[in-house]
Amino acid sequence: MNGQKRTTTSLVDNPINRRTFVKTTVGLSFAVSFGGVLTACGDAPTANINSNIWVTIGSDNTIEIVCPATEMGQGSMTALPVILCEELDADWSTVNIVPVTRHDEAYGNPDFGGQLYTAGQASVESYFPIMRRAGAQARRVLLTMAAEYWSVPITELATENSLVLHRESGRSISYGELAANGNIPDPLPEVTEADFKPRDEYRIIGKVTNRLDIPEKVDGSAVFGIDIQLPDMHYGMVIRSPVEGSRPEQVTPSHADLEGIIAVELLDYGVGIVGISIDAVFEARKRIEVSWSDAGVAATRSSTKTLHEYQQIANDHSLTGSIWYERGDVKAALQESEQLIEAEYQTDYAYHAQMEPINATALVNEAGDAAEIWVSTQTQTLTVYAAAKALGTSNDKIIVHPTYIGGGFGRRTHMQYVEDAVLLSRATGMPVKVIWTREDDVKNGLFRPASAHQIRAGLDGDGHIHAWHHRIATPSVLEYFKPRRWENAGGIDVISMKSADNSNYDLPNMLAEHLITERHARIVPYRGIGAGYTKFVIESFVDEIALARKIDPLDMRIELSRNSPRMQTVLNEVAQLCDWRQPREETALGLCVTGYGETVAAGVAEVSLDKSRGTIRVHNFWAVIDPGLVIDPVNTEAQMQGAVIFGVSHTLKERITITDGIVDQSNFHDYPVLRMSEVPEVHVKVLSTDNPPSGVGETGVPLAAAAVANGVAALAGIRLRHLPLTPDRVLAALESKRAGQDA
Amino acid sequence: MTSFIVNGSPVETANAADTPLLWVLREHLKLTGTKFGCGKGLCGACTVHIDGEAVHSCLMPVSAVEGKEVTTIEGLSANANHPLQVAWVENQVPQCGYCQSGQIMKAAALLKQNKNPSRKEIVQFMDGNICRCGTYLRIISAIEQVAAEES
């Protein structure tokens, strides 16, 4: 097992610590801003080191690389440093990883407005240019230093595995020796696009790089947020209001009457309990009684009613939505069409079900205006904002120690739990680890929103799709979870509407509208975001059109993708993998494609159906993905396998319902997710292409639902238009088919 | 007061008799490799061995392990070199990793009682352990690899 790991050194915003970091490293640090301006610094602390050190080369030849993304299973903690290491031509086995522990735009994701934010399979796609440049710049400086050291022309030098080589004289010098003894060139040499390594010279990109986090995850030593232990640490829980918006009015008994409890704290949204042990808090929780204020209209919410309302809005053409994507003149084109096909689709709320329950640990200082937070978070930036806001202090007073994340999937982008921890630490003066039970999380979950769709296609005389009009009635996720961003978003919500643009299809007249509905539950991003339902609807509907035209769904998609050679390639590849034209006896195949960012993928599900029980089984799933340049083929395959399984899970089983404002589900017994006995074999083919690298962590999710629904349609002649495809819905569709045949 | 053996060492705890073993391990003994997932025996993240049998530590009152031997992921092997741990790395099984201690402990209990399980037997035995990242297929491969090597 290799000894590489995350360092305990971290980049903090305390200047003393920063100097310590630079000094104890003894070597060379390289800072590269997004504009490509390089600074380098020897072991003496200098004013030059501001905030954006990306790589530090120690005199002992170790290399520290900053990884701005948090690791939640997607592999970014390995993939991003690999990119830098490749361009630096460094020895991967000596690389250690440094996390970022504060809100710092220097490391922020440019595609998330400079926030440190790990989501949307964006890390590799967004950070590739900067990681590559940082590595190349540092290598160039080392070459320049070696040229001076040996007094030879730089053109005679090469690098390999953390060594600079002068082949003519047979000499070599390690990066560490140069860092200790060389002179930093002034001015610093700059690299250009032409200096980057050609892809055919890559030594680690595209090869199997065992993930750095895996050894710690097989022996129990990996530290997740919930594992944090601090001296004098106390434990906290919050009894949250059963209905959103109601407040605690009275609570009994007081903490003095509860053994091991040091505080029972009234918060705006619940009752916080802090105790000396987790068991004391559990015990107290059983005894505490709370009366709540009237929640008003929130206490009347029902998910059935909500979806009914959303559907009415989707169907009401007197209402126009926010335009997500428009091409041509869809209304005129629909009128000109020879044939009109129309359908309604609905999707239910879905819960993340990340395995690590929600938690955060905070230590607030005595003055109550600064905090350190240990937390599984997808975003250091929003963690800092939430803590600073709760304490009424400034962002620079908050230090975040991001840990491994036991499943993100979007759940750890909303920071209520950070608020819990800092408020309870401030109230007690103690470091407090706040843990939500699974029931707390489901009952107070932040879901993928319910959505209702009306979708219409107009076909011309040759049967080609002439007009495509998709109306999606669902709330804005951004408006709820990122209100500041929403203010400047112009009504465009990528979370709610992802992939409704059909960017890989040639549709001459097309309109995708977002009917922004009233929010009736707490909603946040969920793995695959809007694509989880938009692709279900779009790709199911494509099959409905293919059926009406009596053409093969594969041929139809090849035709629609005429302007997207990448999509056509993955389609042809997946068709070959699954032997698409080969009829099956007891099963049938269903197809789905998706673009996600720049990534394209196609998937085929092989399904069977128990007609008496209404249960669908997915036996095989073939998936082909083209994410441009592949950083790690094994991890890409693993991400696709996992995402497809996640996708099949939300397709078949996952459904949150709400009655009288209260979530009906509470744990894995009534919110089941796919288990080992239910998973399909997932056969993945990864295509590395000449395109820039794009993401791989989410693409598999939107591939699943329509592939399964289309397979069921092919097998049983029923069209399932409500996600998830639960047995009751399957049985109802079978019954209505029988009734139709009898009539 | 409950006395038992954890990973070969005797321990005594003063926790109430009905405190789940999970919390004694994690928050009192600081053995945090064993995970809290659901608290109801539904997900398997808290799986440990009691006298060699895989159990849900979240449902097990600490008083029930009086005098027994408890093994957690930290005590499964001396240097993370149990064949399953090695196979887990070779197969690059974990993603987020949170459920994997429980998965490995469950699989180790399986191989202890059945050195060469069929795929069906593996799936049947492992079905109580949820992996939300969907690493199930790699878990099966890793167990099959060890079974093939050992038999």
Image (cartoon, coloured by chain):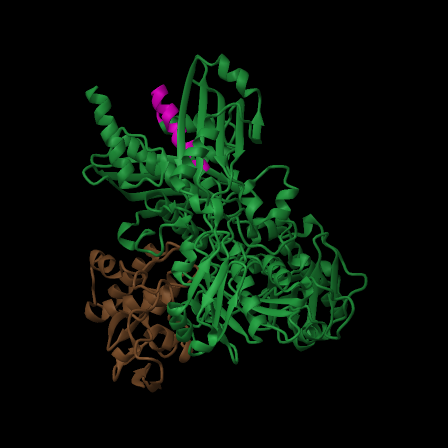
Chain colours: A green, B brown
Quarter containing the N terminus of chain A: bottom left
Q: Position of residue A374 (x, y in %)?
A: 54, 68
Q: Position of residue A288 (x, y in %)?
A: 41, 68
A40 lies above or below A607: below
Q: Position of residue A203 (x, y in %)?
A: 54, 57
Q: Which residues are magenta?
A: A534-552
Q: Is residue A442 magenta?
A: no
Quarter containing the C terminus of chain A: top left
Q: Is residue A539 magenta?
A: yes
Q: Name the one closer to the observer, A373 or A337.
A: A373
Q: Name the one closer to the observer, A498 or B22.
A: B22
Residue located at (26% from left, 40% from top): A727
Residue located at (25% from left, 82% from top): B68
Q: Name the one closer to the observer, B135 or A524.
A: A524
Number of numbered tags placed on the structure image: 0
Q: Is residue A249 left or right of residue B139?
A: right
Q: Is residue B25 left or right of residue A51?
A: left
Q: Is residue A572 visible?
A: no
Q: Is residue A637 visible?
A: yes
Mostly what secondary structure, the magenta segment?
A: helix
Residue A50 in which image quadrant: bottom right
Residue A714 in which image quadrant: top left
A109 lies above or below A341: below
Q: Name the one closer to the observer, B124 or A261.
A: A261
Residue located at (25% from left, 78% from top): B64
Q: Position of residue A172 (x, y in %)?
A: 65, 70
